[in-house]
Amino acid sequence: MAVAQHTWIGKDIPRLEDPKLLTGRATYSDDVKLPGMLEVAVLLSPHAHARIARIDTSKAKALPGVVAVITGEDIVKHTNPLPRFCPEEVVEYALAVGKVRYAGEAVAAVAAVDRYRAEDAIGLIEVEYEPLPPVTDPFEAMKPEAPRVHENLPSNLVFEKTLSFGDVEGDFATADRVIRRRLRYHRASAQPLETAGAVCQYNPATGRMDVWSNTNMLNYVGWLLALTLKLPPSKLNLIPMHVGGSFGSKHILAKVIAIAGTLARLTGRPVKFMEDRVENLIACENLACDRYYDAELAVTNDGIFTALRIKVVDDYGAYFQLSHGTHGNALAQQTGPYRIRSLEYSVQCVLTNKCQQGVFRGAGSDAGNFCLERLVDAAAEELGIDRIEIRRRNFIQPEQFPYKTPAGNIYDSGNYPAVLDKALQMAGLDELRKLQEQARQQGRYIGIGLATAHQRSVYGPTEFWFWGAAPGLTSVPESVGISVGPTGDFTVTLFSPFWGNSPETVCAQVLAEEFGIDPSNVTIAYEGSMHGLPAAGPGGSRMTVMLTGAMVGAARKLKDKMARIAAHLLEASPEDIIFQEGRAVVRGVPEKSLSYADIGFKAYWFRLDLPPGMESGLEARHTYDHPYLTLPSPDRKDLGAFYPMMAHGAHIPVVEVNPETGQVTILRYVAVHDVGTIVNPKSLRGQIAGGITQGIGMALFEECVYDEQGQPLSSSFMSYLIPTAMEVPKFEIGHVETPSPFTEYGVKGGGEGGRMIAPAALASAVEDALRPLGVKVDEVPMTPERIVRWVEAARQSG
Amino acid sequence: MAQRIPITLTVNGMQHEVAVEPRRLLVDVLRNDLGLTGTHIGCEQGVCGTCTVLVNGESVRSCLLFAVQADGAEIMTVEGLSQGDTLHPLQEAFREAQGLQCGFCTPGMLLIAYELLSTNPAPSEAQIREAVSANLCRCTGYQGIIEAVQLAAARQAVTAAR
C-alpha cells in the first residue's frame, strides 16, 4: 500500500508543547500552591508483613504546625477501598488497615503547615507491630501452608488459568523437536522523574472536591476515585496537569488522591501530597511484571515454528489492582510476527509481601517478546539455522494481512521482511561479522543481537477481563473539541492530560492537514472531569491513533457546518465547498471563497446571515471509539480483535562483553520500526530512542530487588540504576511505513516499541558475544554479577 | 517554630531577602518562597540532577544545599535563561533537536548545558555525554539532548566568529 502524500502529516514541525516546558512555565502538580495549603508526609511500614497492634499519634498531633494525623482507622471511616479491576476480594485502602502487607505500605499520614513539619510529626508516631512471616517467593507463596497475604482469600495464588488456541497437543506431538527455555524477567519500575502526587481542595458549601494531580484517566476511571472518596462523581473535579513522565505508572494514582482528598476534607484546607523518591520506588503501587517462564516452541527440522506453549508465574506483590491485565496484553502478540498456528498460555498470579504491580511501558508484552525471541534464538542455535534465516522462514508475509492470530487478535498490516532488510542494511552485517571475528581472535567478546518483534498499539479493554468467565467493559474512547473563533483562530480541546508525549503537536498537525492552516497558530486547551468528554488517555500506544481519529471526526462535523454557512453566503451548494489554504472555496470557482475569519465572524455575530435554523457559534466535538474491537467468544477459544494496530520493529545492537567483570558496552544500536504512517518523525524518534533506553535499563541495570524478608533494597537512584548518557549509544533509527487500513491516515502507535524490543535484542547480543564460552542468557537484567556467574558456570560445565 | 536566619539571594539578577530555617533546602526556597517553580524536584537524593541550578556560575543540586549555605550567592535558574518572549539559543536548540519530551528534567539539563558551553565552547560528543550524564532524563534517551548541545555550540561558534 502506497503512502499517501500529505502536507503536514509526516512533517517535522517543532512541538507546540515545548516553549512552556523549556522556560519552566508549564504547571506540574507540585507547582500548585493554594492559600492555606497544608503538606502531607506519610509513615511507611518498615515490615513486609505485620499486624498493627497499636498506633499512638498523640505526640505527632501535639506538634505545632500539625493540623491532622490519620491512620487506617480513619481511612476506613471516611473512604471506601481503592478501585480495583479484579473480581477477587483483594481489598486495599489508602492506609493499611489492621496489618501491613509490604515494606513501604502507608500506615499513617500527617497534614502540616509544610512538608518539614509533616516529616517531623511522622517521626513522633508510635506504632507497635507484631511481625508476621513474610512471603516473598511466589513458588513458596503458592503452597497451601504459606502465610496468607490476605486472610480472606483461600490462597496466595489469586488467579490461575490456561487458555488454549488451536491444536496445541497435536502440534507438539507431531513436532520434529521441542525447544525449551526457562526464563526470568525481573521486576522493574517506570520511575518518571516526577513522582506521583495530588493537591486536593474540598468546598463543604458546594460539596465539590477539586484535584490537581498527575493522574491520567480523569475522564475514564476518574469517577471511581469519587466512589473511594465517598463523593458523587459529579462533585469530583479532576484537573489535568502537565505530567513529568509516566510510562504507565500514573494511570489512576488512587492512593495519593485518596490520602490528600481525605485530609482536605477533614481539615477544610487545601492539601498537597507529593510522593518522595523513596515512596515512588518502594510504594508507588505501579511496579512492573515479575515473571518466571517455562516456554516451549514446537518446530520442524526445517525450522518452521508450529506451536507455542507458555507457563508463566507472575509475582504480583500484595494487591491485584489491575488483575491479570498484563497477561491479556501479552496475548495480543504472543506469537509475534511468526506464523505459529497454535498457542497455549497458562498463567499463575501470586500474591506476595511486596509492592504491587501496575504497568510499565510494554505492560507485560515486553516480557512476552523477550520470551518468544529467546525461544527463536534457541531454535536457531539448536537446529543450526542462522538467526536471520529462521525468522525469515516464519514471518507472516505482507500479502497475508489482515492476519488472525491463533488467539484471535487481528494484525492489521505489516511488512516484516522489509523491516528486517532495512535493519540489516543499516547495520552492515558482513562488516559486523568481520569485526566480531577479529575481536574474537584478540580475545574480545563482541556480540551481534537480533530481535524482530511486535509492538501492539491501541488497546481494547477486553484484555482486562477475557481471562475470566464474566464479561466486562468494552469502551476505551478518546475525544477532542475543535472551535473556530470569531476571528478565525482555531482552538483544540483535549480531554486527557499531557504526559510527556506530543498530543498538542499531533492535533495541530492533523488540524493543519484538514483545514490547510499553519499548525503553529493552533491554541490547545485541556479539560478535566467537570467538562470532559470520554477519554482514556495515554496508554497502550494509543494516543496518536486515537487523537488523529477524534480530530478527523470533529473536523468533519465542523466542516459540515462551515460548508453550510459558506454555501449560504456564496450561493453555492454545501457539497461544493472545499477547505484549502485557510479558506472555504467553491470547487472550481477559486474566486468565490471565504476566509475562516469571515465564517467565524458570521457564526458568532450575524445569526440572520446564517442558514435558517442554524445555531450560533462554531464548534464541534467528537468521541472516537476503538476502531476495531470485537468480543471474545464465550468459550475464550477466540479472544477477538482487541489490539489490532500492530507495529513492528527489528533491533540489531552490537555489544562488547567483558566476561571477567561482566560489563556490557553497547557499541552500536540499529533499530528500524514500522508504526504505519508517521505523523511527526522527530517526536517518533524521541519515543523510540527513549524507549530503547528504558529497554537498555531493563536489559542491564534496572531491578527492584527485595531481600528474603521482603525489604526493598532498591530505594534510591543509587541502587535502582537508570541509564545515563554514558550508558546509551548514539541510536541509528530507521523507518518503514506500512499504513494501517483501520485508522485515520493509516497511523499506528509507536510509544512502546523501543522498550518492548530492546531487552530481547540485547539478550541476543550478549548471548552471541559469549557464544564461544557457551553461555545461555535466560534472564534480565543482565547485571555484571549475573554475567560473571553465567561465565563461571559455563566454564565449569564446559 | 525553629529559629529563622535572614539570608540574601540574588536570583536571575534580582535580589531577595528571606528568613529561613537552617534546614530549609535551597530548592524549597526557590520554588516555594520565591515562586520560581521552573526548578523541579526529582529525587532529593542528589542523584538525578533535576533540581540543578547555577550558584555563582557552578551547577549545584539545589536539593542538597541548605539555603543558608547560598547566602549572598548569585543564582541562576531556568527562568533566567530566556529574555521575555525570546528563547535562549540553548532553548532554541533543545526545541529544534527535540532534546525534551515531558520537560521535567529540562530546566536542569539546560543549566548543565549552559555551564558546559560557558567553560568549554566546543565540546566533543564524549565531553557532552559526560557533562549531561550528571543528570537523568527518563524520556529522550539523551540523543536529542546531545544533538541540541552540539547545535547550540556550533551556533555559538558562528556568532563568536562574526
Image (tube, grey):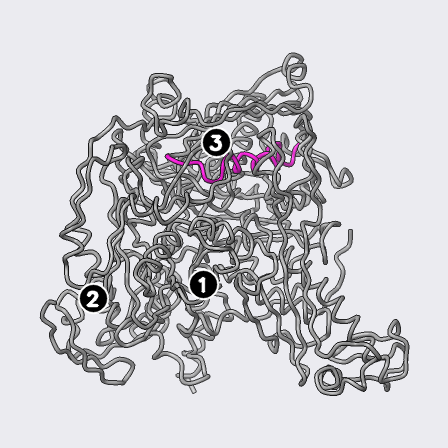
Q: Which of marks 1 and 2 is in front?
A: 1
Residues beneath discs 2 and 3 located on the same chain? no
Q: Which residue is drawn at 34% across and 49% down?
A: A280
Task: Judge whether A43 appears above or below A396 on screen.
Answer: below
- Give the spatial CA distance, label 1 vs label 3: 32 Å
| Chain letter belonging to callout 3 | A
> What residue would you read off at disc 1?
A208
Q: Is the magenta stretch mostly helix, strand or loop?
A: loop
Question: Which residue type carries mark 2?
Answer: Leu
Q: Which residue lies furthest to the top in this view?
A: A173
| Chain letter belonging to callout 2 | B
Say whether residue A587 is left or right of residue B32. Answer: right
Extent of the magenta region: A318-339
> What residue would you read off at disc 2?
B25
Question: What secondary structure is found at the residue carrying circle 2?
Answer: loop
Say whether residue A360 is left or right of residue A711. Answer: right
Q: Which residue lies furthest to the left in this view?
A: B3
The image shows residue A573 at horizontal and vertical percentages of 90, 76
Q: Say whether residue A730 is magenta.
A: no
Marks 1 and 2 in Cβ contact (< 8 Å): no
Q: Return the residue nearer the eye: A435 or A90.
A: A90
The image quadrant that residue A52 belongs to is top left
Q: Return the residue nearer the eye: B32 or A693.
A: B32
